[in-house]
Image (cartoon, helix red, strand yellow):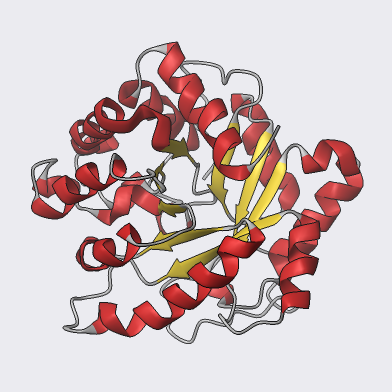
């Protein structure tokens, strides 16, 4: 949605700040949707519209994420990345842009190499955040996850998980054994109404500081977790994450907000990060230092 005229960002992003989770959508006749269970009608949300949104906050680095609407057809996102590379020049692009795709686990090595050259550094493991509980479903995902763990460890890539909280919780033992870094979108999709003491979220908190600390959490899509006005019910969970592992949190706009676009404001969501991390030093870690470490920017 357009930003209301009376809304202004409550703080400016520090130099080098990153939006680590956003999507682009092109014309439907050129990029047909591949998800047979599509829950929403995606908007036309091209690269230029996103960049105008990013400039408002001072965002300078970008991580494209493949939308579920396109399933494993990554063309729209990859075309946008190529367009951005042409505008920025190769050197600046390599220091500023990454992508996370959706792939078959048995894709060719040549495919991985070509994507790596374009700046792709991750694969999405993505299921509907409103998927109802299905007994045994998590175990059906494990072979694909393990196959990617083996292949991506060699490539220096990561995995990016999105699913309902129950699925996140059931996959935590599998995640614990991963060799690659991995991120959890939308704080693992644990619902804010159940608070930071809910068992799955507490297990995530513990995992963040275990072993080689390969787990990262995204402050993204909080309107999918929270229901209170202004999504203030998500603040206690965000504070628990910051207090536990401020060096393992990244932020993303989740632009263009899809089925929530008429219900949320990008400025209000940005300002909420100020409530999650009131001090400037912590926000710099979340916006600059952490994505720099995770995505391999010098």
The part of the image, by quadrant, that contains residue 273 is top left
Q: Looking at the image, which is closer to me, 284 or 236? A: 284
Depicted 7 relative to depicted 160: above or below: above
Q: Residue at x 71, y 44 (%)?
A: 97
Figure quadrant of the C terminus: top right
Of 14 and 151, which appears nearest the observer?
A: 151
| Left/right of residue 118 with respect to residue 180 in the rendered view | right
Where on the picture, by quarter, is residue 125? bottom left
Name the spot of residue 143 as percent of width and height, x first. 40, 82
Query: Is 268 placed above or below 282 here?
Result: below
Q: Position of residue 21 (x, y in %)?
A: 53, 48
Image quarter of residue 106: bottom right
State the residue at coordinates (9%, 52%).
199
Identified at 61% across, 44% down, the residue is 295
Residue 24 visible in this rendered orientation of the protein: no
> x and y percent of residue 275 in the render?
32, 22
Viewer-side residue, 13 vs 246: 246
Foreground pick, 227 / 124:
124
Identity of the residue drawn at 49% across and 49% down: 254
């Amino acid at each position: 949605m357009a930003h209301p005229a009376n809304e202004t960002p409550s703080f400016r992003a520090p130099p080098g700040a990153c939006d680590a989770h956003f999507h682009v959508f092109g014309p439907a006749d050129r990029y047909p949707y591949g998800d047979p269970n599509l829950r929403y009608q995606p908007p036309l949300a091209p690269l230029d519209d996103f960049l105008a949104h990013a400039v408002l906050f001072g965002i300078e680095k970008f991580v494209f994420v493949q939308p579920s609407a396109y399933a494993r057809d990554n063309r729209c996102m990859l075309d946008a990345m190529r367009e951005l590379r042409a505008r920025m020049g190769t050197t600046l692009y390599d220091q500023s842009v990454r992508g996370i795709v959706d792939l078959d686990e048995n894709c060719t090595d040549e495919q991985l190499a070509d994507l790596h050259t374009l700046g792709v550094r991750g694969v999405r493991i993505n299921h509907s955040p409103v998927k109802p509980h299905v007994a045994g479903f998590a175990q059906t995902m494990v072979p694909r996850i393990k196959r990617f763990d083996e292949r991506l460890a060699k490539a220096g890539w990561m995995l990016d998980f999105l699913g309902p909280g129950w699925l996140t919780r059931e996959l935590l033992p599998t995640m614990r054994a991963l060799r690659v870094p991995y991120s959890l979108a939308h704080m693992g999709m644990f619902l804010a109404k159940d608070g930071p003491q809910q068992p799955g979220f507490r297990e995530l908190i513990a995992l963040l500081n275990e072993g080689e600390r390969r787990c990262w959490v995204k402050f993204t899509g909080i309107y999918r977790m929270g229901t209170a006005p202004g999504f203030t019910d998500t603040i206690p969970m965000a504070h628990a994450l910051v207090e536990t592992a401020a060096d393992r949190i990244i932020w993303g706009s989740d632009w263009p907000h899809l089925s929530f676009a008429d219900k949320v404001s990008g400025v209000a969501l940005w300002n909420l990060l100020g409530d999650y991390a009131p001090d400037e030093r912590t926000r710099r870690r979340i916006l600059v230092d952490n994505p720099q470490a995770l995505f391999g920017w010098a």
